[in-house]
């Protein structure tokens, strides 16, 4: 890897990332022959930059929060010839950067990228887009819609979970039908998460034993909103080997089709633009990523 494009969100972390820009540039220029920065000014800029430079560079780095990462990966994933991908975390949760072992200090992450250690990783694909971390409906979507940006900045990842606990009892169950190679399942539910990565809101809450190298999606169904159920999940005691209790269903699959009544808003790595029904599929070893200290 010699030529690098850095898609840089100057507003990430309320400008904290911007303060480190010069040092990040210096770190990367020591390791790579050519480093070019592209600053985003509005949504869509990141995807446009990928289209512009993808055939000219060996590595594209998304420097920003989860929104920047999501936009860039959705531009890279459908390409026939895909450059390697890396993340310099600059947001609040930075979920997938944690998954691949990146240090949360942006300058330290740049130093890790300079080491050029890469791994092939799985990503998820839906009818409309791609995701690195998770696809979800139900309470997870309601929580992400109600956590305002100030709360995220002030209390960070805990904002998601405090909001989740406040939501319990307010969410009405919906009818859920899921089909996969493992069979057909139909019942009432309050939340469904299909995971590739293991972090949500900065914490390994839902799939602590998941993997981005196994060619499988991790599926979690919550049938009813109860405090004991959610508290046990937030304590990271869910695994993929069975069910914790009657209110939870977990399994792994390569592809899953989801139907609901009524239609549910979808949260796909924090982006909320579509509704069910939907089909979600894993793309094994689809992206070459520069990684940090992976366990």
Image (tube, rainbow, N blue to C red):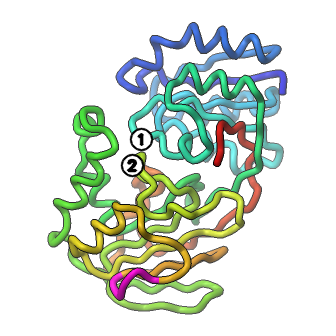
Give x and y (percent) for residue 209. 56, 64
Residue 163 in percent (x, y) is at 22, 54
Q: Nearer the viewer, residue 41 or 149?
A: 149
The quadrant of the rendering that contains the N terminus is top right
Looking at the rendering, the stretch of residues picked out in magenta corresponds to 243-247
Labels 2 & 1 near each other (Cβ < 8 A): yes
Q: Residue at x 51, y 61 (%)?
A: 208
Left or right of 30 in this view: 12: left
Q: Is residue 145 depicted above or below 275 in this figure?
A: above
Front residue of this view, candidates 270 and 199: 199
Ranked by sequence position, the earlier of labels 2 and 1 is: 1
Location of residue 199 with respect to 86 vertically, above or below: below
Give the labeled residue for mark 1. 93
Give the label on residue 201, or none.
2
Q: Is residue 58 above or below residue 123?
A: above
Circle 2 packing at 10 Å, graded few (<14), some (14-19), many (20+), is: some
Residue at point 21%, 61% (across, down): 165
Q: Residue at x 75, y 33 (%)?
A: 54
In which quadrant of the rendered view does residue 108 lie? Answer: top right
Q: Secondary structure at mark 2?
A: loop
Give the distance between the C-alpha atoms of the residues marked 2 and 1, in whole angstroms: 5 Å
Task: Give left or right: position of 69 versus 25.
Answer: left
Magenta stretch, overall SS = loop
Image coordinates of residue 243 in percent, x first then y, are 45, 83
């Amino acid at each position: 890897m010699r030529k690098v494009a850095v898609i840089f969100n100057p507003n990430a972390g309320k400008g904290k990332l911007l303060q480190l820009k010069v040092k990040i540039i210096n770190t990367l220029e020591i390791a790579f022959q050519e480093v070019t920065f592209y600053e985003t000014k509005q949504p869509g800029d990141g995807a446009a930059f990928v289209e512009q430079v993808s055939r000219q560079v060996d590595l594209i780095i998304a420097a920003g929060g989860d929104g920047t990462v999501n936009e860039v990966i959705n531009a890279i994933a459908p390409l026939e010839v895909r450059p390697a991908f890396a993340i310099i975390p600059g947001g609040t949760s930075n979920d997938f950067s944690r998954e691949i072992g990146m240090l949360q200090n942006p300058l330290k992450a740049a130093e890790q990228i300079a080491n050029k250690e890469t791994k092939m990783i799985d990503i998820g694909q839906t009818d409309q887009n791609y995701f690195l971390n998770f696809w979800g409906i139900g309470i997870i979507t309601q929580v992400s819609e109600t956590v305002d940006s100030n709360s995220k900045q002030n209390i960070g990842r805990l904002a998601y979970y405090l909001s989740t606990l406040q939501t319990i009892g307010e969410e009405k169950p919906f009818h859920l039908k899921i089909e996969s190679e493992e069979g057909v399942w139909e019942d009432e539910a309050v939340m469904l998460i299909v995971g590739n990565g293991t972090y949500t809101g900065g914490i390994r809450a839902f799939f602590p034993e998941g993997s981005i190298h196994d060619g499988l999606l991790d599926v979690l169904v919550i049938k009813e909103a109860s405090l004991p159920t959610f508290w046990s999940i937030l304590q990271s005691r869910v695994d993929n080997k069975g069910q914790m209790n009657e209110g939870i269903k977990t399994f792994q699959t390569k592809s899953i089709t989801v139907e609901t009544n009524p239609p549910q808003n979808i949260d796909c790595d924090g982006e909320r633009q579509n509704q069910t029904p939907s089909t979600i599929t894993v793309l094994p070893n689809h992206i070459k990523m520069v990684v940090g200290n992976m366990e």
